[in-house]
Amino acid sequence: MSETLIPLPEHTPPEVAYIALDYALEQHRKPVCELDPRQAEELLTKARQRYRLEQRILSSSEGHVSQVPDSTLRDAESKIRQRYDTAAELHTDLARNGLNADGLRAALRHFLRVDAVLAHVREQAPEVGELDARLYYHAHRSDFDLPETRSARHLLITVNAQFPENSHPAVRRRIEALRRELAHEPDRFAELAQRHSECPTALEGGQLGRLRRGTLYPELDKALFSLPEGGLSPVLKSPIGMHLLHCERIHPARILEEEQALPRIRALLTQQRQKDHERQWLEEIESELR
């Protein structure tokens, strides 16, 4: 194993090195070893504080749930190994960040244990009852007015003067020829989009899914929401090229009735309540460390 290159004091726990790396990538998009000394020391200070908090989490009364199955740990290691072409590349990168294979395993086990405790804490949040969900529905009634949406397919040919076949006149001729075909056989839109469209949606026959107003370029959006169900647009221009749209289905605006909305509301409120419960629990843990 090559010598560690980041400015870590000797015997720094691998968990701290891993946290510092996580912070560095999140905040600076590069590892700690590429930061200036001031930035590196700030991150290491934050990493030590976080590690201290996480040690307290694991020693709490809820920490008994923090056992990590070996299979879960192996899966986490495997996901990291898959980012590298060879084991040598992985070991070199670990060394650059103050870690080795054993240290990585220890850090991953630590974080999986912390995640298990926090998941357990979230599960202790008070249950969201039916009355809670119904009160939410009536207090946020306008949130359940669903706007009109349209299911559509799309065909794009880009304009690029560097390529003769994508010059403006050539693209116009190609897409107008396609429109003439579709005017006679609209059911072939998916087939022709798959063969001729230069949009990533071509792989799915031009399928755009179910769209609300304001999702597409303004020119395309206006055209789509003026088409009848089953309608084919004229040739449309945007900053990236020329387009055809096919409106497959119109989904009228509607109100999501209370009974339909309740499962969604309970899921939303449960998530919010669990986050609040976790936050309050962590604040209590942090207050013990002051």
Image (cartoon, grey):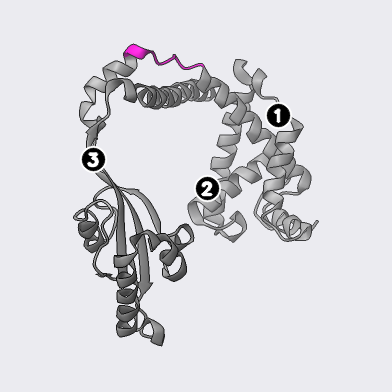
Question: 25 left or right of 174?
Answer: right
Q: Which contiguous range is marked in magenta?
A: 124-131
* Quarter of the view holding residue 76: top right
Mark 3 or mark 1: whose residue is earlier in sequence: 1
Q: From the image, tell me which residue sits under label 1.
A: 68
Residue 248 vertical position relative to residue 241 in the rendered view, above or below: above
Mark 3 to mark 1 CA distance (whole Å): 49 Å
- Residue 271, which numbered label? none
Tell me the element at label 1.
loop
Please tell me whether mark 3 sits on a helix, a strand or a loop: loop
Q: Amino acid at mark 3?
A: Pro
Q: Main secondary structure of the magenta part?
A: loop
Q: Which residue is mark 2?
A: 42
Residue drawn at x 46%, y 24% is: 283
Q: Is residue 126 magenta?
A: yes
Q: Residue 256 at what x, y percent from top left? A: 27, 29
Query: Does residue 157 sit above or below 62 in this rendering?
Result: below
Few, some or many C-alpha atoms within 10 Å of disc 2 (few <14, some 14-19, many ≥20)?
A: few
Which residue occupies the foreground of this view, 264 or 208?
Answer: 208
Give the residue number, with chain letter if any, for mark 3: 252
